[in-house]
Amino acid sequence: MSGITFPGQSHSSSPHDALYPLSFDSASTSGFQMNPLSAHPPRTPRTSVATSPFDPQADAEKEETEEYPHELEVELDEEEDEIQEKSAAQTRIHAQAVWREMLETSAGRDKTFKIIQYSMKVYLLFHNAVSRRMPIQGDRRRAFEAGLLLRLGSAVSGLSLTRKCLIMFNWLTPLTSILAEHHASPVYKAGGARAAPSSRKPLLHTFLHAPPPVLLELVQAVADDVATCSRLGLLGRRTGERAGRFADWCWFASTLVDLVENSVELGMIHTSERTVESRLYAESMTGATAKSTPRNTKIDDRELKLLQKQAYWLQVQRTKLLMDLIFVSYDVFRWQRGREAIQALSGLASALLSSSKLYDRHRNSLTKSKVLSF
């Protein structure tokens, strides 16, 4: 019992003091302290607010917390992402809701009417091909078929004129960008001082120095409107035909420009994908895991998924542009062999591809709005 020290007594020089150096001295801390050689070591105490900044124990704890500074943030981000993914998975967007959002816009109505128009064209194409091999029996049935084909042909022509009217005044978009560039660009004198607004360069100079794709879009939209006015009876037939042919040439050139831009963007996306994949592979070969480098791995995974999605839609857009190029080439070069069949099939494929991209965009916006409302 001599090895036990009670409060108020002096420390003994017992050999047990080397094993049990802690005591219930009143001068020390009043809390209970466990034996460090016990089979159940004590829990790591929390850092006190009143800890001295020169305490080596506080420095050691600070180094341990600074080893993974973003670990807590990543855990919180993962929890938020899991919550959003679960809510997005539970949120079911009906197809009729997406189509309702699409039809509220002029672009959505244009794509919808284009699908209906070219579906009718494809049906008429196959119907004529089948009726040639299997002649219709009976005068009444023959008259019904003739009336049906006449009504479908009239509907196709009406939908074509409706789509032309829907895209009227599209030249306002490139014109607005050119005028904004004209008003935003300052003019400087020879000495470097800024000139007055009255000494600005003429508007024609801004038009001539505008980007070629913007000018091409402007000219094509104006030519399309002239051709539409001719079909409506506001202008002469010859003027409408010339404007329509000029619009076809502009469409052909703009499609080629878009294909070049699409190829460049797709190449950049593939390069970024290979960079991210090589970085992920290097991290996996060095033994890095999602727990050792949580923030870097999570960022790389997100970036890779985003790049793959962008590459997918760029490939869809490239296929759509190829269909448009095939369609407009028959009008520009006036090819006649297989004209109706190829233009009907390429037009329907282009309508479906462009509508799928627009449908995905509206569905994503509806999903985000519902998730945020939760």
Image: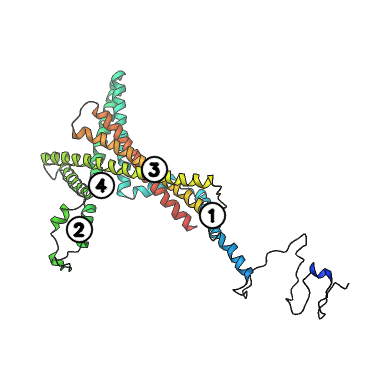
Examine the rendered structure and indicate whether residue 33 appears above or below residue 294.
below
Mark 2 or 3, closer to the camera: 3
Mark 1 or 2, closer to the camera: 1
Cα distance between the residues tagged 1 and 2:
46 Å
Mark 4 or 1, closer to the camera: 1
Residue identified by numbered label 1: 78
Amino acid tagged 1: Glu
Q: Is residue 147 visible?
A: no
Q: Measured from the top left, where is residue 65 in percent x and y?
A: 58, 63
Q: Which image quarter: residue 247?
A: top left
Q: Measured from the top left, where is residue 371 in percent x and y?
A: 48, 55
- Quick one: label 2 or label 4, which is nearer the N terminus? 4
Judged left or right of residue 370, residue 181 is left
Amino acid tagged 3: His
Whether pointer 1 and pointer 2 mark residues with C-beta atoms closer than 8 Å, the reply is no
Residue identified by numbered label 2: 179
- Quick one: label 4 or label 1, which is nearer the N terminus? 1
User: Which residue is rendered at x = 75% and y = 70% of the image?
Assistant: 33
Q: Determine whether the residue tagged by mark 3 lies in a helix, strand or loop.
A: helix
Residue identified by numbered label 4: 166
Category of crowding for the residue at label 2, using alpha-carbon neighbours closer than 10 angstroms: few (below 14), some (14–19), many (at least 20): few
Amino acid tagged 4: Leu
Q: Determine whether the residue tagged by mark 4 lies in a helix, strand or loop.
A: helix
Whether pointer 2 and pointer 4 mark residues with C-beta atoms closer than 8 Å, the reply is no
- Quick one: label 2 or label 3, which is nearer the N terminus? 2
